[in-house]
Amino acid sequence: MKRRRNQPKQASNAGGEKVQAASIVPNSPGSRWRRLGLAVLIPLFVLGLLEFGLRVAGYGYRTAFFLRVNDNGREMLTANPKFGWRFFPAAVARAPRPLYLAARKPPDTVRIFVFGESAAMGDPEPAYGFARQLERVLQARHPEQKVEVVNAAMTAINSHVIREIAADCKRRQGDFWLVFAGNNEVIGPFGAGTVFGRPAPSLAAVRLILALKRTRLGQLLEQLTRRASEPANWEGLEFFLKSQLARDHPRLKTVYASFAGNLGDIADFGERSGATVLLATIPVNLRDCPPFASQHRADLRPEQLADWRRLFSIGAQAQAAGRFDEALSDYHQAGEIDDGFAQLVFQRASCEMELNQPAAAGTDFRLARDLDTLRFRADSRINEISRRTAAAKGVSLIDAEEELARHAEENIFYDHVHFNFTGNYRLALLFAEELEKRWPGARTNQSPWLAEAEVAQRLAYTGFDERRVGEEMRARLQQPPFNAQSNFRARDERWQARLVALSAAPAGYVSNYEAAVAQAPEDWLLRANFARVLDEAGDNSGAARQWAEVSRLLPHSAEGWANQGRFARLSGDTARAKYFLQEALKQQPDSVETRTEFGILEASLGENESARRQFHEVLRLQPGFSAARVNLGLLLAHEGNVAGASAEYREALRWSTNSVGARINLANLLAAHGQRGEALTLYEQAIELEPENPIARYNFGRLLAAENRAADAVTNFEAALRQRADMGEIHYELGQALARLGRETEALDEFSQAVRLKPDLADAHLNYGVALARSKRYSEAMAEFRETLRLRPQDERAQRMLEKAEHSRGGGVLKQ
């Protein structure tokens, strides 16, 4: 039987007639695409409208590395201070160094970009980093062209961030791109050991996250989902103490793959931009940097661990006694139980060095670095990826790891990865020599490279600067994780001795800076450091002039304006101080340094509530900014709130354990209220941290004098004068202490200096008069007593001493 086709149903109308029911017509392909298009376009339109609205409302921040500014008709580029916000929480975000360059490269200019992390940037003082030294050595060798080295490196970043910087540099007409990166791949943003979000996401996920954060909607979403546990203060490597990773940790595979991908992209960006790309491997401190942390293998049994510890302890004792053969034997036996403990391998390498086994020592030092579970240094895999990338992309490789290993006997590192001046010079020469091979026309130049001492002269790297940087490094190396390293005490003692040896007065280096500035008057960094020398030397007007030059050369940086404000305040010109500080805040509204200085100014004018608001705003932005806490403490102390002031000083020390300012001011407060024991301890700690700090020495000396410890007081006053020989108050206090010790002639000289430098100090005139009278120089003594009375007419003692001096001049005997 035939199957019947389905027939359309029929229906009756009101009149009973049969009518055909309407068929359901399937959607046409065009209508489906229209609906799908609307489903996509409408949300996109809404999102676009929201994005536009957020931008119009001023929400969010610009994400480019460079910002365009107009400088009297010239289009210039500056570094975006908020560039780091995409990669770090805003409260701890790292910022680029101040930059100022023409948007279009000037003619006859060779523009060189430097990419990398803090070691490439030149930390702890970029003014003397390899980028600056490279600029000087190339410029001296090629005076016919302007050499412009743009330091695009940043602290705490890694290749995920460097790739974004490089993408922005594609349009900046660079002739050479120098890439020196790899130390922060594990602990930097998106690394396996990061504390700033989910560790080690895939490279695709990283790219998506960063693309979203370019939008204001993405930034809003990030703001709404921000964790309450985000850090509020930058703590350096202390952030990562819990981020230990063995070298076989599975997340490291993602790290290495991401580094290879990012490095390849950076090389491609550079080549496509028309630049010549130079990649470098990363040297790290192997010999003088013990591992930060070590781990035993997971399957070690208790009895094996006990045997290992016994052998390691015996070996360590033998090593300390200089019996390196015995120690090495013990370490090898321990290694048969567990050879993956980084500290064991490092100590074995140290013994091999002592026994003149350099090949074995080199292998073990590198292995110790690779086994270190706090992965703060570029390891073997990172450097191998750099070598492979250079080969695969056909770009130049500078094997700095191998080249600088030849200078291992020299001291070229400050710490685990950061170079001292000599190390930066060695690195600059490596780049300069390779760069010249690829610089058309440069290879015919036969003039020698500048020597290290000549570079130091042109950058005005003086003993003052060496000490300034050294104090910063010693303070860092006293913090975790450095203070847990096995060589901490010996290293700290060497630093202390070195800093004591660098105690010359800053005024002696002014001529060095004058000569360097004459050679490079447009160098803002040189002028900023000159200002610091003049400041320390007590030449406030000279320092202010240099900061004015910094603002002229770098008008969109807050630093120059803020420092002009500070020196205007010190000179008593509060109107100009306000103007300069307001200008600084225009450039960087969230500058904690500028807001703190504004608070100091307002406090000096008696505007205590305004000052308090400034300090609280700073502490909201950055709770650990100790300068704001210390000055809030000073404000509270001035108001008589001793408990509040003490609490702020102690909180500053909790956030910044090495704060010298917090110690000095807390000690001053305690001493003024009779708590001399703790005050003495705090002064001692301050001087331990900064042996040549003149304020700490001066105040400590005064308290020692009050404790009848005149000899110790003299030692501290003399140390203070090595730095501030222009301070009449110190000469006066030293004269007092010398007089108590019966050293009358020396006391007389100090009082003479005091009245010369501080002619309105009545007590100095009075005591100078006494010293003169004791030396039977009665006429001169009478002049000093009269000057005391002019300054302080009601001074009964001065009147009495004047009368006795007149009597003694007539044949009597002077008694106090």
Image (tube, rainbow, N blue to C red):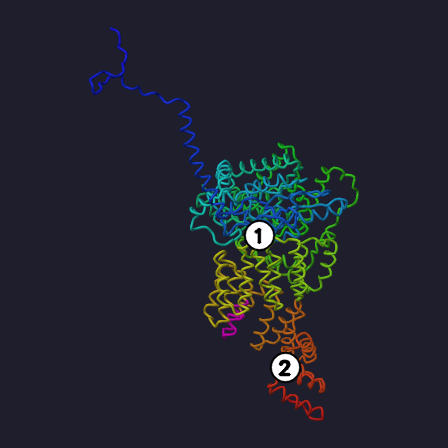
Tell me if residue 20 comes above or below residue 61 in the rendering. Answer: above
The numbered dot on residue 442 is none
| Side of 800 where 49 appears, left or right | left
Q: Residue at x 52, y 50 (%)?
A: 93
Tell me if residue 397 comes above or below residue 326 in the rendering. Answer: above
Q: Which residue is mark 1?
A: 318
Q: Amino acid at mark 2?
A: Leu
Tell me the chief SS of the magenta region.
helix
Nearest the viewer among 730 and 676 is 730
Tell me if residue 466 comes above or below residue 73 in the rendering. Answer: below
The image position of residue 380, as x and y in percent, is 58, 40
Nearest the viewer among 234 and 62 is 62
Q: Residue furthest front?
A: 15
Classify the position of the N terminus by image quarter: top left
Dot 2 or dot 1, earlier in sequence? 1
Depth-wise, is mark 2 or mark 1 nearer the camera? 2
Q: Which residues are magenta?
A: 664-680
